[in-house]
Image (spheres, rainbow, N blue to C red):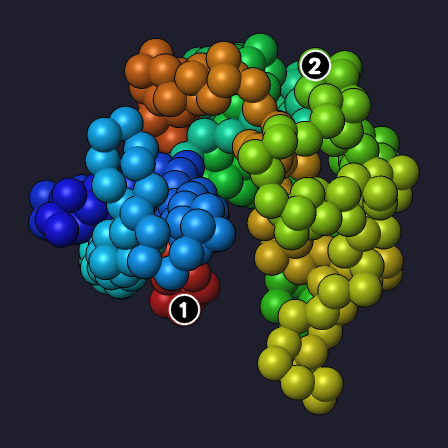
């Protein structure tokens, strides 16, 4: 009974992909159908009849053994799940922030040519940050960490941040941002992603979720987050987007989600490109640049605060 691919994966401390796990579930489902069909065919000829299949006699005892083997395989899924949780904890909390995905055309329109400041703010002769983001502008690839950092750089460099008395800091979208994000219909190099259709293997729940998002495509990003609030209860919650006060910084993650191309609709070639070593390296280099810029401004803010306290 140790032939279960799930058991082998668990013993080898191997983490299976979702597709591999789905294949195992499909195999078990097909096995159930096959055992039922065999038993129905056998009992048609009498309760003690044995089917002759390619020289193998299959009787009631054999059918029972098939069921026992299948149940053992199903129980082994628990071991896979336990191993999955263990591997998940080892991946670290920032895994999703680092995983590359494709970005809708609107985000490209917004960030391409935007004034983002310098690659090295401490050096006035440094290159422009906007010249270092070809991964996004040319390949339409990014990850959540990169997108959030770039939007932060744009907000700071263009002085969009607003301090609202008694509330967390907000930022006010400028005309460039409002124009670029005036629609949220997912487009990929000019193609409506909704026109691709769905893979036959995609489950109905996921299809429904994607379709729910796509149907709001004519709305702007701001309209789509206008009813969301931040806070645990009515007394402390505040709107994410207040037209007079601006946007909470948590809206950055919401924009990232709205303009992310669903990975389920990527072609195999597109999926391969996302994990291509060259593209992953480009993402790592851009992330490093953005971290250094963030660190620089963080240090500058600390110095300003210290000077104010010392005055």
Q: Is residue 167 left or right of residue 6?
A: right
* View extreme (right): residue: 218
Q: Residue shown at 24%/41% (left/top)?
A: 57
Residue where numbered disc 2 is placed: 189
Q: Is residue 190 left or right of residue 282?
A: right
- In this view, the residue in front, 164 or 173, is 173
SS at badge 1 = helix
The part of the image, by quadrant, that contains residue 290 is: top left
Q: Residue shown at 72%/56% (left/top)?
A: 247
Q: Quadrant of the C terminus?
A: bottom left
Q: Which mark is residue 309?
A: 1
Q: Nearer the viewer, mark 2 or mark 1?
A: 2
Residue 253 visible at all: yes
Q: CA distance from mark 2 to mark 1?
A: 51 Å
Q: Residue shown at 17%/50% (left/top)?
A: 7
Coordinates of residue 185 in the picture (x, y in percent):
80, 33
- In this view, the residue in front, 204 or 189, is 204
Q: Are the residues flagged by discs 2 and 1 in contact, CB closer than 8 Å?
A: no
Coordinates of residue 291 in the picture (x, y in percent):
37, 37
Coordinates of residue 249 in the picture (x, y in percent):
61, 55
In primary-sequence order, the first of circles 2 and 1 is 2
């Amino acid at each position: 009974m140790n032939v279960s691919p799930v058991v082998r994966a668990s013993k080898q401390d191997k983490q299976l992909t979702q597709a591999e796990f789905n294949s195992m579930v499909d195999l078990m489902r097909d096995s159930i159908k096959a055992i039922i069909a065999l038993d129905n065919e056998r009992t048609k000829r009498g309760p003690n009849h044995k089917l002759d299949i390619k020289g193998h006699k299959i009787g009631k005892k054999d059918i029972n053994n098939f069921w026992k083997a299948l149940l053992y395989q199903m129980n082994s899924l628990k071991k896979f799940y336990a191993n999955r949780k263990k591997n998940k904890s080892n991946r670290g909390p920032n895994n999703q922030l680092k995983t590359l995905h494709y970005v809708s055309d609107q985000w490209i329109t917004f960030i391409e040519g935007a004034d983002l400041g310098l690659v090295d703010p401490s050096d006035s002769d440094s290159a422009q940050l906007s010249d270092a983001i070809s991964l996004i502008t040319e390949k339409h690839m990014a990850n959540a960490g990169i997108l959030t950092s770039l939007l932060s750089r744009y907000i700071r460099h263009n002085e969009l941040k607003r301090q609202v008395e008694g509330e967390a800091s907000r930022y006010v979208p400028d005309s460039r941002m409002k124009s670029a994000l005036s629609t949220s219909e997912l487009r990929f190099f000019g193609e409506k992603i909704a026109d691709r259709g769905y893979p036959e293997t995609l489950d109905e729940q996921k299809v429904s979720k994607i379709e729910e998002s796509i149907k709001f495509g004519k709305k702007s990003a701001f309209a789509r987050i206008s009813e969301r609030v931040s806070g645990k209860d009515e007394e402390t919650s505040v709107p994410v987007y207040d037209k007079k006060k601006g946007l909470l910084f948590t809206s950055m993650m919401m924009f990232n989600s709205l303009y992310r191309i669903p990975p389920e609709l990527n072609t195999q070639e597109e999926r391969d490109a996302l994990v291509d070593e060259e593209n992953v390296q480009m993402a790592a280099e851009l992330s490093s640049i953005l971290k250094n810029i963030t660190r620089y401004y963080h240090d500058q803010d600390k110095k300003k605060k210290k000077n104010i306290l010392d005055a």
